[in-house]
């Protein structure tokens, strides 16, 4: 029993250390700014209300528009599908908003099927690779930066990240840090695709606590 207790205690220390290391990386990731010329800007989706971007999504889109007008990429990809009962997808709401921000329709690309960060990024990645584009500039909330970079690499892209301001995102910074720490920790162990599938099975189609679709 004493040996078992020591093994359990050692395992607890290792898990705590792993989570602490991941949390430290997450803490520093939002401060990263790597906006350089790339093949495409990719905006991760968030909630929309009957065609109107939520504050979180609007912050991402405003930032993406600024990056486009600074000539950091020739095209902007907007991502995100529809929630049940919605008339608009996150991508279509983003598309209309960016056109009002003087991003020409010819420069906009839509990914409308993704229900999660992983699905949206991998779907966009397939289309980007077909066009010979791999260098991307990812736009999302600051606390999302580390995970989307890892997913983009897993999808065969060469990502840079330029976080949007997080003022429109609900919840405390500590809670967002905890969510992303858990998501990244599990994603590293089982792979982000498996994490998404596990999440879908556990929640039976409900909103994931670590996906961009919905409130954050």
Image (spheres, helix red, strand yellow):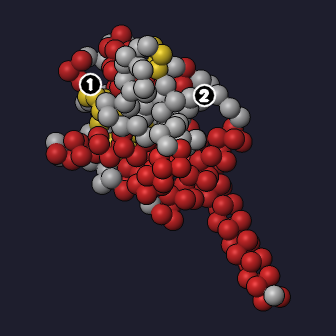
The picture quadrant where one finds residue 72 is: top left
State the residue at coordinates (23%, 42%).
Answer: 128
Q: Nearer the viewer, residue 114 or 58?
A: 114
Q: Residue furthest right?
A: 2
Q: Residue furthest top?
A: 100
The image shows residue 144, relative to residue 95, as above or below, that is below
What is the count of numbered marks? 2
State the residue at coordinates (78%, 89%).
Answer: 3
Tag 2's secondary structure?
A: loop
The picture quadrant where one finds residue 9 is: bottom right
Residue 26 is situated, as x and y percent measured from the top left of the image, at: 60, 50
Q: Residue furthest front?
A: 204
Residue 115 is situated, as x and y percent measured from the top left of the image, at: 40, 37
State the residue at coordinates (40%, 54%).
Answer: 193
The picture quadrant where one finds residue 169 is: top right
Could you say which disc has been placed on residue 169 in the image?
Answer: 2
- Answer yes or no: is residue 182 visible: yes
Few, some or many residues within 10 Å of mark 2 (<14, 14–19, 20+): some
Side of 61 where 5 appears, left or right: right
Could you say which disc has been placed on residue 108 in the image?
Answer: 1
State the residue at coordinates (29%, 42%).
Answer: 123
Give the position of the C terminus as an image quadrant.
top right
Could you say which disc has been placed on residue 118 in the image?
Answer: none
Side of 122 where 178 appears, left or right: right
Question: Which of the marked residues, 2 or 1, is nearer the chain's N terminus?
Answer: 1
Side of 87 where 198 appears, left or right: right
Residue 74 is situated, as x and y percent measured from the top left of the image, at: 25, 30
Give the position of the N terminus as an image quadrant.
bottom right
Find out whether the residues at labels 2 and 1 contact each other: C-beta distance under 8 Å.
no
């Amino acid at each position: 029993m004493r040996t078992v207790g020591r093994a359990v205690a050692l395992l607890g220390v290792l898990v705590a250390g792993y989570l602490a290391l991941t949390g430290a990386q997450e803490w520093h990731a939002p401060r990263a700014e790597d906006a350089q010329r790339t093949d495409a800007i990719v905006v991760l989706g968030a909630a929309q209300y009957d065609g109107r971007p939520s504050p979180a999504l609007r912050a991402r889109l405003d930032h993406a528009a600024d990056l486009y007008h600074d000539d950091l990429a020739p095209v902007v990809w907007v991502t995100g599908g529809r929630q049940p009962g919605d008339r608009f997808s996150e991508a279509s709401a983003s598309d209309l908003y960016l056109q009002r921000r003087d991003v020409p329709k010819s420069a906009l690309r839509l990914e409308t099927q993704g229900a999660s960060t992983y699905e949206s990024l991998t779907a966009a990645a397939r289309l980007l690779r077909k066009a010979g584009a791999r260098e991307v500039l990812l736009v999302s909330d600051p606390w999302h930066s580390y995970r989307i970079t890892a997913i983009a690499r897993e999808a065969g892209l060469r990502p840079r990240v330029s976080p949007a301001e997080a003022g429109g995102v609900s919840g405390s910074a500590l809670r967002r840090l905890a969510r992303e720490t858990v998501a990244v920790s599990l994603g590293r162990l089982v792979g982000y695709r498996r994490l998404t599938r596990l999440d879908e099975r556990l929640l039976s189609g409900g909103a994931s606590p670590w996906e961009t679709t919905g409130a954050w």
